[in-house]
Image (cartoon, helix red, strand yellow):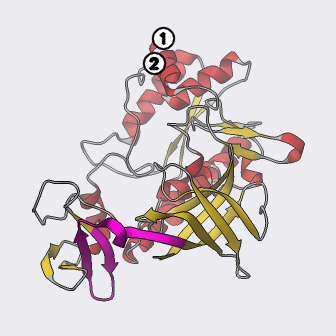
């Protein structure tokens, strides 16, 4: 729906718009929104808007550049964010190149974010609808990738997007926002992961080593997780068990309950850093997010000689997770980000 309304807005502004559908996953799983169903929606929406449409298959590239990384991270016991890599490696990679080959001057997406191109410098900006802002997922984009990009929803509220879709009677106007893994869909995550990675059950232990249960495979858990541990106990959310650590060496899931201070950390080290306009300096203070749905936090950043960054939190942070991205902000601008490697408590 977001892409469809974006196409409509661009057409209203006088652009010659072409719809390009990406088929990035080969699947036959029943019960989820298949690529074939999605493409049927694209055709019907494009006909409604009066624009041509094409389909292109990037399943090979997705598997090589995104999915292999996704599996490798889970093998290491980390919690990756494939959507960030999907944007860098697919949407603003082969997709952008394909669109250019078709003769496009720009590509446009339905992301909730903004962009400025002043003085030949491309800056990624927050969306007007802060509740939907998606700059977090675009933190790895480069100047070259952002040079010919339009974000039509930069100043549009989600409620207005739904209203426009309803008024246009688009077939996907009532479609729920996707919450599944990028291009893999709304399927059962544990079942999906089990298809590709063998799980190894092991002990669930407390922080003092007492065995309290059995886990079904460390890859299925993440720091701070409370649900799905199978430990029973109180329904009081303040006293429920939660994941403290994944002990990969001993295949143990470490848990605690009550006091969450064991989840708090004071700093992190990040790698694979990308600075969208440019590196702000060797040392600087800014705001940052350590997960998508999180208010920005104050941090002090120091760049190391090897290109990694030490990030000191102004306030202790809960369940900062290796494998996720730390994303940096200066007011309305996304400065860039990197992968969280280690966390210091």
Quarter assignment of residue 14: top right
Residue 263 drawn in magenta: yes
Residue under the point 21% across and 54% down? 237
Quarter that holds the C terminus: bottom left
Judge by depth and name the residue closer to the eye, 7 or 63.
Answer: 7
Distance CA(mark 2)–CA(mark 1): 8 Å
Which residue in the protein does label 2 denote?
170
Residue 195 visible in the displayed image: no
Which residue in the protein does label 1 denote?
167
Residue 152 in the figure: left or right of residue 42: right
Label 2: state its secondary structure.
loop
Number of the label disc, if any, that sits on residue 75: none
Give yes or no for contact between labels 2 and 1 (Cβ–Cβ under 8 Å): no
Label 1: state its secondary structure.
helix
Callout 1 environment at 10 Å: few (<14), some (14 to 19), or many (20+)? few
- In the image, residue 20 sits, relative to residue 145, either above or below, namely above
Residue 237 drawn in magenta: no
Residue under the point 20% across and 60% down? 228
Residues rendered magenta in the picture: 243-267
The outermost residue toward the left is 233
Prevalent SS, magenta region:
strand
- In the image, residue 6 sits, relative to residue 169, either above or below, namely below
């Amino acid at each position: 729906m977001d892409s469809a309304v974006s196409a409509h807005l661009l057409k209203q502004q006088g652009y010659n718009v072409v719809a390009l559908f990406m088929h990035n996953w080969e699947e036959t799983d029943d019960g989820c929104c298949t690529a074939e169903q999605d493409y049927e929606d694209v055709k019907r929406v494009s006909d409604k808007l009066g624009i041509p449409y094409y389909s292109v298959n990037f399943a090979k590239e997705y598997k090589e550049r995104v999915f292999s990384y996704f599996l490798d991270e889970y093998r290491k016991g980390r919690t990756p964010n494939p959507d960030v890599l999907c944007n860098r490696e697919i949407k603003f990679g082969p997709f952008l190149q394909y669109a250019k080959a078709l003769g496009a001057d720009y590509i446009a997406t339905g992301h909730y974010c903004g962009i400025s191109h002043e003085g030949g410098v491309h800056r990624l900006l927050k969306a007007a609808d802060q509740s939907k802002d998606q700059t977090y997922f675009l933190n790895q984009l480069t100047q070259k990738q952002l040079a010919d990009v339009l974000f039509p929803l930069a100043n549009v509220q989600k409620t207005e997007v739904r209203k426009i879709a309803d008024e246009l009677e688009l077939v996907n106007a009532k479609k729920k926002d996707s919450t599944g893994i990028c291009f893999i869909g709304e399927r059962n995550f544990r079942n999906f992961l089990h298809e590709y990675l063998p799980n190894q059950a092991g002990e669930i232990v407390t922080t003092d080593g007492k065995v309290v249960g059995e886990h079904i495979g460390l890859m299925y858990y993440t720091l701070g997780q409370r649900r799905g541990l199978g430990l029973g106990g109180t329904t009081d959310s303040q006293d429920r068990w939660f994941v403290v650590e994944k002990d990969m060496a001993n295949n143990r899931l470490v848990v605690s309950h009550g006091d969450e201070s064991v989840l708090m950390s004071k700093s992190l080290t990040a790698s694979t850093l990308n600075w969208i306009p440019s590196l702000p300096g060797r040392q600087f203070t800014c705001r940052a997010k350590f997960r998508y749905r999180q208010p920005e936090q104050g941090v002090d950043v120091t760049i190391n000689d090897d290109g990694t960054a030490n990030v000191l939190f102004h306030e202790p942070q809960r369940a900062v997770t290796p494998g996720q991205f730390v994303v940096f902000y200066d007011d309305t601008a996304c400065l860039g980000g990197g992968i969280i490697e280690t966390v210091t408590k």
